[in-house]
Amino acid sequence: MNWETNITLPNQALQVMETLSSHGFEAYAVGGVVRDALLGRDCSDADITTNALPDQVKSCFSRTVDTGIAHGTVTVLDFDAPVEVTTYRTETAYSDHRRPDGVQFATSLEQDLTRRDFTINALAYSPKDGLIDLHGGKEDLRKRIIRAVGDPRKRFCEDALRMLRAVRFAARLGFTIAPATLQAMDENAPLISHVSAERIFAELDGLLLSEHPEHLCDSMPLLREILPELAICFQTPQNSKHHIHNVAKHILYATATIPPERVLRWTMLLHDLGKPNARTTDDSGRDHFYGHDEMGVKIAQQILTRLKAPNALIHEVCGLIRLHDIRIFPDRVCIKRILHILEKFSTFENLLAVQRADALAQAPALAKGKLEILDASYAVYQSILQSGEPYLTRHLAVNGNHLLAAGVLPEQIGRILDTLLERVTEHPEENEKEHLLTLIS
C-alpha cells in the first residue's frame, strides 16, 4: 500500500487541478481515484472537487459539458480523458431514501467530505496539500475495512443503495464491513425497496464480476430483501455423496470459482435455486433433487426479469441452467448432440466452464473424476471442430432448396433435415449430397 503523500494520479486529473489552482481555486482529487492510488490499483477515472462554482469552472477550460450542472458537476474535455469537476456541496434531506431533495454549494472541503458514503471514499488529495483524511479512511484501508462516514444508520437512510455499494466494495477489494456499519445495514435492509431494479441489477452485476462475489451474503437481511430465493438455500442441506455444503454455500463456492464473465457468474449464482423446492429424502437419508434444473430455470427467469436484466443475458443464463446437469461424455455423438442444442443460446466452452465450477464446489473426492471427463470431452470437441463434422442442419450437404427440387413438400422439409442430421451425426462420412438425396427417395 502506498502511504506516500506523492500519490500517482492520472495526468488529466493533475492537469485539471493545476489549471483550477492557477486561477486561484482549491481543487482536490477525491473518492475512488485516491483510494485506488493508495491501494496501488489502476484507476483511469478521476473526480475533482473544488470551491469554484460551475460557471467559474467552465471559465477555466475551453471545452466542458454540463453533465450534472444542477448538482454542481461539469465535465472537462480539455485533456486526454474526461474529468468530472464538482463544486463542494452539502445535501438536504433524502425523502425517497435514494437522492437528496436538493443540494447546496459549500465553502469548504470538510463539508463536502462529510456527506460521502464510506471513509475510504472520503479521501482527498492535491499535489500542494497532499492527502486529506478527515474520517480515518487511510487507517480503514490499512485494516481492510468498509466503514460508513459518521452515523451509518443516517448514511443508509439517506441513500439505501449505499448498502449494496458497501457489499460491492467489500467484494471488489476483499475487505470486511465494520460491525457498526454491517449492523446498520441489517437494520435498514427493507429500505432497499426504494432503489430501482435497474440500479440493484447494476450493483449485483459489479459485485458478481469482482474477486470475491461471496460477499453478496455479508448481510443476510439485505440478501433476503434482494434475493430471497438464494437466502432460503442456506436452510437446504445436501445429504449426498456428491456434496459437502448446503445449497447456498455450494452456489457461492461455484460462483467464486468460475471465471469472472457476466454470463458465467450469473449462471452459477442462479443454477441451483430450484433445489429447495425439488428436495426429497429417501429411506436411507439421502437427498435427491429431481427436476431442480427446470425449476431453477423458472426461478432464474423470474429473478432476472424482476431485476430488468438484458434479455440476451436472461436467454443464455436460463439455457445454461437447463443444461448444467446434463451428462457429458467424451463421445463424438454425445457432444455433437449437445452442440446442436447449445447453438441456440450459448457455447460448449461456457457449458464446460459451468460444469467444471459445479464439480469444484462439490465433494473433492469425486471432483477429480468429473474434471477428467470434462477435459477429455473438450479434447473430443476440438477434434470435431478440426474435422468439420456436421452437427447443425446448415452443415448438411443438402438444404431446403435441394429437397424442394427433389419433390419434397415444403411442410416436410424441416422434419426431413432433422432426420438427415441425426443420421450424419452418427455417420459423418455419409454427409454427401447425392447420398443424402437417395435417403429421402
Image (cartoon, rainbow, N blue to C red):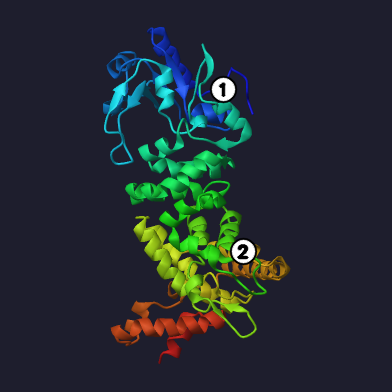
State the residue in front, 78 or 406: 78
Residue 143 versus residue 429 in the image, above or below: above
Label 1: element kind: loop
How far across and how far down the image is residue 237, in percent? 58, 69
How far across and how far down the image is residue 22, in percent? 41, 8
Name the quadrant of the C terminus: bottom left
Residue 344 versus residue 47 in the image, above or below: below
Name the quadrant of the N terminus: top right
Q: Going by the image, does 200 lie left or right of 248?
A: left
How far across and how far down the image is residue 31, in percent? 47, 28
- Whether residue 55 is visible here, answered yes or no, is yes
Residue 318 versus residue 39 in the image, above or below: below
Instruction: Please tell me the numbered disc located at residue 8.
Output: 1
Label 2: element kind: helix
Task: Tell me how far mark 2 sits from mark 1, CA to CA.
Answer: 40 Å
Q: Going by the image, does 212 lie left or right of 31?
A: right
Q: Residue at x 45, y 50 (%)?
A: 204
- At label 1, which amino acid type do we have? Thr
How far across and how far down the image is residue 83, in percent? 40, 25
Q: Going by the image, does 308 lie left or right of 250?
A: left
State the residue in front, 85 or 152: 152
Instruction: Please tell me the numbered disc located at residue 164.
Output: none
State the residue in front, 207 or 226: 226
**Marks 2,1: beta carbons within 8 A:** no
Question: Crowdedness of circle 1 by 10 Å Cα count: few (<14), some, many (20+)?
Answer: some
- At label 2, which amino acid type do we have? Arg
Q: Quadrant of residue 155?
A: top left
Instruction: Please tell me the numbered disc located at residue 356.
Output: 2
